[in-house]
Image (cartoon, rainbow, N blue to C red):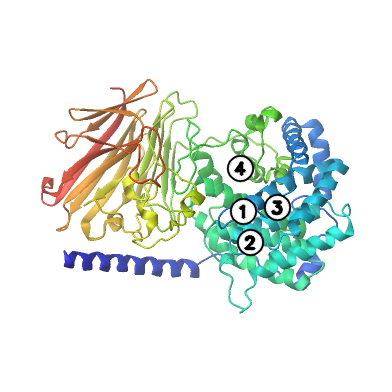
Amino acid sequence: MEFMGRAFCAAVCLLVCVDYSHAKQAVAALPQLDNLITVDYLKQHLRETQPRLVFTPELVEELKVGIKTDPVLKNMYAAIRLNADDILAQPLLTRKMTGRRLLHVSRAMLYRVNMLGVVALVEGDAKMLKRLDEEIRAVCAFSDWNPDHFLDVAEMSLAVALALDWTAGHLPPATFDIAITALIEKGLKPSWPEDGSRWRYAYSDNNWNQVCNGGLIAAALAVADQEPELAAKTLHRALEGMPNALMQYAPDGVYPEGSTYWSYGTGFTVVTAAMLESALGSDFGISTMPGFLESAVFRALSIAPSGMYYNFADCRDQRSEKGDTTLAWFAMKSGNASFFERERFLQAPAEMGSLNRLDGAALAWLVQFESREAEDFPTAWKGDGANPVVIFKGESADPRGYYFGGKGGHAISSHGNMDAGSFVFELNGVRWVHDLGNQSYHKLEKTGFNLWGREQKSQRWTLLTKNNFGHSTLTVNGEPFVVSGFAPLIDYQEGEFPRVSFELTPVYGPNMERAVRHFIKDGPTSLVIDDELEVSKYTKLITWQLLTTAEVEPVEGGAILRQAGRSLRLENRSHPELRVAVVSLDPPPMKLDRRINELKRIEIALPAHVAVNGKIRLNIRLVEGD
């Protein structure tokens, strides 16, 4: 056992070294943005007229016409107007922390500015201008914007910058001065360490980079006339650092942090690109970074026919009923009407409720959208990269609503889980195989739980939502995955019966000699999970897992799953003699685990001695009917 422990640690260290080596090569090969920013460049290219952040005077005029003539613009503006009227009846924001975050306040301010500000732009409404004046004064009077959790600063900086820009010339001079000072002292300066060290958030490889750089770009553009040196160096740093996050979309558009964080990181990036274009005449290459435009396909395909997401990583379960305005930016750029959720934008304004906090800015791309023919999404799609994903679906008119999503990757991705080899599966409007998705950060953190550690023995991996015991994959010897073990996509074939293969060996360390998982759509109502395994001298027990909320009846050769008046057969085609076990996860193992009604784990246990010449081929088929 002692030797096994040393071997396991050695394997982990080797994997870490290999991953680090690849990471260094990747960083060295990063494509760069067209970083032309200097003080002189800023003075020469900064638009003189305002608004100049997202909106321009020309776009505002187009919008005024569009809300009278275009059904989508008219409807969305009506919804924004209702939201703005609701804000007038609410108290001003106060600096109230939730745990270690002020983020909910910053987001509330960004939402208010987007609603009130657009109405002020379009109508010059005195009530909206007065309330914006009050809102700006309130948040600028805060002692700080919580730089210890810099997302809070970034979202507040974007809010105040947009408020200033969209009300240019219509606020009291004292308010303007207060806001400029706050953007400098509470927004920009905290991002420049006093010891001269490099500010890590500007160069990180996740959504923090996109949000923090986006908020500070807005602040820099807002104060450029007063502080050109500070503005120029902030803009230059942002354009230098953003490729670290933008390259995570390469090569095919998968956002490694999942669909929810695609919305967050990408939402801020498209606003950033729009601000740079409107203020300086260029997005400096943001929209042409490898995989970025293609990520719209990833986002669209991440929404299953049931309305649930393929919710890997820290992703919520269900999409919003409202139209996706971030996806609409990609429609504007491409002309592809498939990215423009017209019917959702045409819901009754009163039924939309509170809009997204960037939906005011989004009117700028809704007004610029010129539809070309809608392009059908592929029925089989591969997204390689840092967190490889494959999605199989039916045709657009598929009456069965076929949907499969499977993945490789590794746990130490930002917001990642021990989910290599896991999958979700839908048929006939039923989610048969589940990913457990996300759970409240604050509820965990307030107990003292260390949610964010990513070492092998971090508390994060004790949660069912984060470890491999809460995912539909293979577990070996009842042990957690090797967190740094990367499971690559090694084969992919399109066609009538698409298939994909993931090399899972690295996530098991010495516990397995080799593990390859194949997913095959072998018919319009079925999915095959085919595992090609080689045991090592440390292999004791291999457990095949499937997470479901269906009622499960073990039968000879597999099981019958029933849910919502439908049924699905689980066929163990390679080892029909092995009995299916059902483990209830409602309630879950730990008090802190997310509770999901009727959740259970189907298990098929294979002791190592079933191997023939050290090899096992486990073939499971899921198919409609009982």
In the image, what residue occupies the spot 81% across and 46% down? 131
Q: Earlier in the sequence, mark 1 or mark 3?
A: 3
- Residue 124 visible? The answer is no
What's the residue at 62%, 60% (across, down)?
212
Label 1 Cα neighbours within 10 Å, binned few <14 / some 14-19 / many ≥20 = many
Q: Give the number of the mark in front: 3 or 4.
A: 3
- Residue assigned mark 4: 327
Secondary structure category for the residue under label 2: loop
Q: Earlier in the sequence, mark 4 or mark 1?
A: 1
Q: Please state if 245 lies on the left or on the right of 137 as rendered.
A: left
Front of the two marks 2 and 3? 3
Distance Cα–Cα, label 3 vs label 4: 32 Å
Type of amino acid under label 2: Asn
From the viewer's side, name the closer residue of 125 and 175.
175
Residue 146: numbered disc? 2
Q: CA distance from mark 2 to mark 1?
A: 9 Å
98 displayed left or right of 450: right
For the residue pair 300 and 337, the one nearer the viewer reads as: 300
Distance CA(mark 1)–CA(mark 3)? 12 Å
Q: Which of the two discs, 2 and 4, sits closer to the camera? A: 2
Inter-mark Cα distance, 2 to 3: 13 Å
Crowding at label 3, few (<14), some or many (≥20) Cα neighbours within 10 Å?
few
